Image (cartoon, coloured by chain):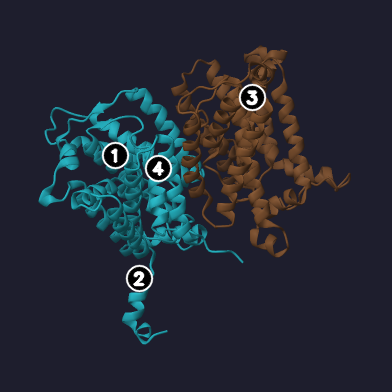
Chain colours: A cyan, B brown
Amino acid sequence: MTAWNDSAGGRRARAILTSRPFLTLAMVAAVWIVASFVSRGFGAYGHLRYLVELGAVIGLVAAGQTFVVIAGGIDLSVAAIVTVSAISLPLLSWQADPTGLASVLAVLALTTAIGVVNGLGVALLRVHPMIMTLAMATFLQGLLIIIAGGSAVTAENPLVHWLGNARPAGIPAGILLWLAVSVIVLTVMHATPFGARIFAMGANPLAASLSGVPVTSTTLTVYGISGFTAGLAGVLVLGMNGQGYVGIGDPYLLASIAAVVLGGTSILGGLGTYAGTIPGSILLVTITALITVVNASPGWRSILFGSLILGLLLLSGREQARR
Amino acid sequence: MSIIPSAKSTGALYWPVQARRNIGVRSLFLVVLAFLVAYGVLFPGLFTASGFAKFTQSWFPLALVAMAQAILMLTGGISLAIGATVSLGAVIAATTMAGPLGVAGGTAAVALAGLGIGAATGFIVVKLRLPAIVVTLAGSFIIGGAALLILPRPGGSIPAWLSDLLAGDTPAAFVLLVVIVLLWKLYLATPLGLSLYAAGENPVGAYRSGVPVDAARVAAYAISGLLSTGAGLFVAAQTGSGDPVIGTAFTLNSIAAAVLGGIGFLGGQGTMRGALAGSLLLSLMISVMFFLGFTPVAQYVAQGLIIIGAVAIPQFRKVQP
């Protein structure tokens, strides 16, 4: 060990350099540098900004997913919730609402309620999170087809349009939204009693419950947050797309879970941080962009996407060996 | 579930052990029986030869994927790629059987694909120590992509005589299921099968006692893959062609059937007969909805509700006393 390792500052620097969020960030930087040498135009500021803007959608979905996973659960209904949000928003437009704020709030309330129902099933009915959220996704999928049919719906909401297209000070509004959400999420996760409770619950639910953590209400809140952020992502993706359709949210299920795991959060719960999920989301978008550059059929694209995620997991997502 | 039935434990010990293993699923068996009687009263066609054949055919693929999921959950694993694997099995069957390979070659290709995919997944999960849920979720993209590559849109064909044999008026599906269940009993008597429950219930303890934990888990994934592609072959025979996304619904249904059948998520808890009963219950519900004239979309909605309800109610009862 060298001398600077023994000093307090040195140890701190070492801890940061070997932390999972930093490693994921380094991986993003490496992929970006290599890709910009290989493909002309990849490294342009405009393109990278666009990537981060796309990453904002995954990042928002993954924010709720990070909470749920740290609390020891998993939310497989996020894709369906994103679709619910993107489809019900155009349907919930009122004449007496020139800014469109009311309908956005109504949709967010709806998706939060869906999340809370997930939480009710998990906490009160004691259904396993995977079953509860997968069944919820199946249920919502059927409902969406009944409501929207096969056609796409166009959003005429000024606020949503602004969110998807405006660039205050040259930075897309979606990125600013993500930034704001990230600050709130990191604060709640690491600097509030609620944050401490979800870590405790994920590490050992029984011990947490015996230590006075209100497991039921915490679970409801965690799944509610996931519904809320997935709804927010749906609003953003609707703004960027202009249209909502059944299936618009489908890519975000695997993406959100992969972003969480790539960012160093343990899928078993109790360990992790949103600070890792942020570079994880950008990494995923970068992968998707690289796959799009390679002009391939949907089958090959799907294979490449799955393989690259598996490969990245091998680099960073391994569990501790037992024994 | 600390005691595993084996072919060696003859007579005196065997039946009491089996009776104890049945306690957990006894109420489920009663519910299934009640449903079967109700179904038989509502649709008397069930008791004719062709009605029975049709009924077992609609149950068969679900029974296979429920077994595929249950064997993984018994070892403490899970697969979210079952649906994609079923689709892959269906497209491989539909593209190879009418070609030069013939039915025998096509069946071999389906079986090899299932075993290979399962073993590869098992290797990644067990040897490379990645979380099963993420590996199989990523795997579902890879396997689904491969199915799309083989058959970009619904098509291909299955020889008519095979469709008639498997999905015609013969009880072939039921016979196959009985054979598979007997094979499962045999497997449980082999060293790998004996290790299955131990590897799921307490992997560290089992490892320290010399149980081949890793081998048992990889073998479970391989068998699970084989059962899934087999279900795909049967679905292709039923529809007479292949469809690259036909298996999607089986992922949720397989987990639901296994959980309905009393298989625990933590490994080592539950019995295969329970999983089979769970799949039968689910299949009965789906058939009843179909006969009552639910549209496929409404079936989605109802299925989501029923699964939550069916999983929640037993859990609820467990908490009360």
Which residue is at the front of the view, A84 or B138? B138
Q: Chain of mark 2?
A: A
Q: Residues within 10 Å of mark 4 (few under 14, many from 20)?
A: many
Report the mark closest to the observer, 1 or 3.
1
Image mark for residue B35: 3
Q: Are marks 2 and 4 in contact (CB under 8 Å)?
A: no
Report the mark closest to the observer, 2 or 4.
2
Q: Amino acid at mark 2?
A: Leu
Q: Earlier in the sequence, mark 2 or mark 4?
A: 2
Q: Chain of mark 4?
A: A
Which residue is at the front of the view, A103 or B209? B209
Name the residue furthest right. B11
How far is the residue under mark 4 from the one under mark 1?
Answer: 13 Å
Q: Find numbered disc 4 in the image and state the secondary structure of the residue it sits on.
A: helix
Q: Are marks 3 and 2 in contact (CB under 8 Å)?
A: no
Which residue is under mark 2?
Answer: A17
Q: Earlier in the sequence, mark 4 or mark 1?
A: 1
Residue at 14% in and 32% down: A97
Which residue is under mark 4?
Answer: A253
In the image, taking residue A159 as reference, residue B23 lies left or right, namely right
Q: Quadrant of residue A88?
A: top left
How far is the residue under mark 2 from the one under mark 1?
Answer: 34 Å
Q: Position of residue A72 (x, y in %)?
A: 46, 54
